[in-house]
Image (tube, grey):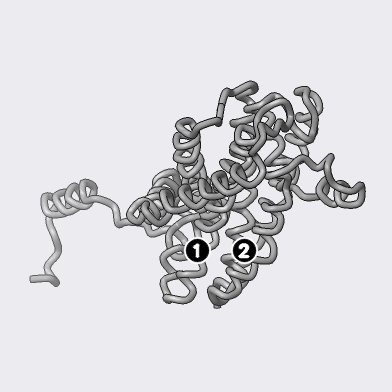
């Protein structure tokens, strides 16, 4: 009976049984993070999600933009490259090719970064980005890396096509400038695209940023001309356009010549200024994501 006193053997058996019994599971305090440091698995998963999203429709996201940019080369070469026109010591087709590659990279990095959050808000799937255990910095890093990857793939497709183009020579004079300005340029447009995606509430808003901000800055960046041919006032305007430094620095990597200058020292100032601009916009983007503005509630 339960009321009967236990003997010594029963008491020892119960004590021994309780000593080997596994302890009760202790759940963490509510709100206490379970993942300390960087969530590498979550970050990699988000990055691969972004990459696979545009790879599945690569005809639209990689090859079509590459063909469209190549049409610029055809049109401007026919219109302005006749008569053996020489710009910065090379024929016009070779001069314009690096700028077109960089312009294609930037435009597609922007398009990729500006789509994900906006599509999520419109389709009601934004929770797929907000509920995983990712910090604002990890979320931003995964989105930016995915957009930069698309821009780089478009650039490689363009470079491969232009290597086969008659009259175009893509010899690399300064590899560091090609890599640096290629990465900084795609990062800049990815950050702008991500901010646009957070702010926009419909696709018209995104199109407005593309048509009234990104495209004008890209077309007026010296892609098709040297700014020395412009009036002094327009030269000053060009020098405050960050796209100008991206295009000119990238072109310097191929030709060894640019509107910025013909020495590593001259181009280095533009490279450092571009890195500083990316750092500022990156900090703003991080604070916006951390606040949950237009994403939560």
Q: What residue did someone put label 2 on?
A: 210
Residue furthest front in the image: 83
- Place residue 6 in its image quadrant: bottom left
Residue at image coords 60%, 42%: 77
Q: How many other residues sit within 10 Å of disc 2, few (<14), some (14-19) or many (≥20)?
A: some
Rendering coords of residue 223 (x, y %): 68, 44
Number of marks drawn:
2
Q: Quadrant of the C terminus?
A: bottom right
Rendering coords of residue 112 (x, y %): 50, 56
Residue furthest right in the image: 232
Nearer to us of marks 1 and 2 is: 2
Tell me how far mark 1 sits from mark 2, CA to CA: 12 Å
Q: Quadrant of the N terminus?
A: bottom left
Residue at image coords 80%, 24%: 265
Q: What residue did someone put label 1 on?
A: 115
Can the viewer see residue 42 in this picture? no
Q: Which mark is residue 248?
A: none
Describe the element under mark 1 as helix, strand or loop.
loop
> Horizontal placement of 202 versus 224: left or right?
left
């Amino acid at each position: 009976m339960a009321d009967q006193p236990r003997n010594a053997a029963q008491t020892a058996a119960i004590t021994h049984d309780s000593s080997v019994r596994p302890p009760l599971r202790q759940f963490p305090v509510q709100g206490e993070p379970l993942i300390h440091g960087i969530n590498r698995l979550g970050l990699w998963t988000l990055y691969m999600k972004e990459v696979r999203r545009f790879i599945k429709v690569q005809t639209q996201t990689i090859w079509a933009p590459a063909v469209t940019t190549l049409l610029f080369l055809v049109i401007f070469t026919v219109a302005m490259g006749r008569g053996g026109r020489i710009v910065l010591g090379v024929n016009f087709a070779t001069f314009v090719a690096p700028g077109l590659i960089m312009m294609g990279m930037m435009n597609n990095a922007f398009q990729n970064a500006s789509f994900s959050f906006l599509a999520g808000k419109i389709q009601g799937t934004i929770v797929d980005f907000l509920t995983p255990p990712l910090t604002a910095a990890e979320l931003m890093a995964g989105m930016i890396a995915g957009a930069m990857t698309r821009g780089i793939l478009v650039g490689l497709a363009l470079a491969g096509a232009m290597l086969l183009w008659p009259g175009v020579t893509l010899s690399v004079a300064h590899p560091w400038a090609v890599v640096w300005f290629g990465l900084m340029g795609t990062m800049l447009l990815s950050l702008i695209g991500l901010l646009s995606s957070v702010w926009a509430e419909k696709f018209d808003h995104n199109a407005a940023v593309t048509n009234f901000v990104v495209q004008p800055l890209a077309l007026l960046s010296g892609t098709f001309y040297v700014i020395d041919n412009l009036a002094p006032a327009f030269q000053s305007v060009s020098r405050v356009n960050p796209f100008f430094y991206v295009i000119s620095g990238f072109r310097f990597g191929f030709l060894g010549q640019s509107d910025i200058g013909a020495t590593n020292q001259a181009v280095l100032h533009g490279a450092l200024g571009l890195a500083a601009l990316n750092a500022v916009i990156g900090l703003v983007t991080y604070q916006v994501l951390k606040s949950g503005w237009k994403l939560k509630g």
